[in-house]
Image (tube, grey):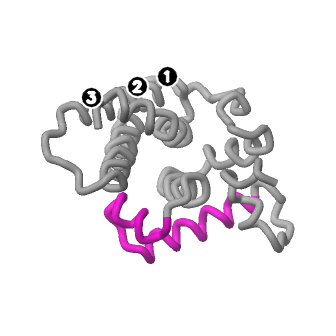
């Protein structure tokens, strides 16, 4: 796959991941650009398209973590209009709360509920155990449930959390 094809196929997804992780449009654009620069420099072949996609996600996530570490030197600007980046308008409230989660939690919650990856796939991408992924998803769901519903019990929270399916209803 050429770089142009990869940008067309994966660019939007990588931008959304970076936007959620960094909460800054400019930083997200920089992270995606850096990811594709690394992609151009990558000489080893990929086993298949899923391996290529997982590699891009891992590089983008690592770049976001690096940028987070360096953020202390620059003031943070909060993203105010999240609706602009959502596929469906209903996603904006959940996406806003997702951005407020701790880094480790938002990464697995986003990859599972928005990008649709399974626990084992996320564990391979992030280099953590499947149990760690499940625990982070549990903590992320609890945190989102509390911030979105004020601690009220919600029977179908997990169904409502599936942002990628929300607009299909």
Residue 30 tag number: 2
* Residue at the outermost left position: 43
Q: Few, some or many C-alpha atoms within 10 Å of disc 1 (few <14, some 14-19, many ≥20)?
A: few
The percent coordinates of residue 22 (x first, y second) are 50, 36
The answer to whether 85 is drawn above or below residue 101 in the figure is above
In three-dimensional space, the C-alpha distance between marks 2 and 1, rounded to whole angstroms, equals 6 Å
The one of 165 and 17 positioned closer to us in this rendering: 165
The one of 29 and 165 positioned closer to us in this rendering: 165
- The residue shown at (54%, 26%) is 25
In three-dimensional space, the C-alpha distance between marks 3 and 1, rounded to whole angstroms, equals 17 Å
Q: Which residue is mark 1?
A: 26
The percent coordinates of residue 79 (x first, y second) are 64, 29
> Magenta stretch: residue 124 in it?
yes
The one of 29 and 103 positioned closer to us in this rendering: 29
Q: Quadrant of residue 30?
A: top left
The one of 158 and 138 positioned closer to us in this rendering: 158
Tell me whether the residue at label 2 lies in contact with that at label 1, contact meaning CB atoms closer than 8 angstroms: yes
- The residue shown at (35%, 49%) is 58
Circle nearer the N terminus (2, 3): 2
138 horizontally vs 147: left or right: left
The answer to whether 25 is drawn above or below residue 13 in the figure is above
In three-dimensional space, the C-alpha distance between marks 2 and 3, rounded to whole angstroms, equals 10 Å
Residue mark closest to the camera, 3 vs 1: 3
The quarter in which the N terminus is drawn is top left
Q: Which residue is mark 3?
A: 37
The answer to whether 155 is drawn above or below residue 26 in the figure is below
The percent coordinates of residue 37 (x first, y second) are 27, 28
Range of magenta residues: 118-146
């Amino acid at each position: 796959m050429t770089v142009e094809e990869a940008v067309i196929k994966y660019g939007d997804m990588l931008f959304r991941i970076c936007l959620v992780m960094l909460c800054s449009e400019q930083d997200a654009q920089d992270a995606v650009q850096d990811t594709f620069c690394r992609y151009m420099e990558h000489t080893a072949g990929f086993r298949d398209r899923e391996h290529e996609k997982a590699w891009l996600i891992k590089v983008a996530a690592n770049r976001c973590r690096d940028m987070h570490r360096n953020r202390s030197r620059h003031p943070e600007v909060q993203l105010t209009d999240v609706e602009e980046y959502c596929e469906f308008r209903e996603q904006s409230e959940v996406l806003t709360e997702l951005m407020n989660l701790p880094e480790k939690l938002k990464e697995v919650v986003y990859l599972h509920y928005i990008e649709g990856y399974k626990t084992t796939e996320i564990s391979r991408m992030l280099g953590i155990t499947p149990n760690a992924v499940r625990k982070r998803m549990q903590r992320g769901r609890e945190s989102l449930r509390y911030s979105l519903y004020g601690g009220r019990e919600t029977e179908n929270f997990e169904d409502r959390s599936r942002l990628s399916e929300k607009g299909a209803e």
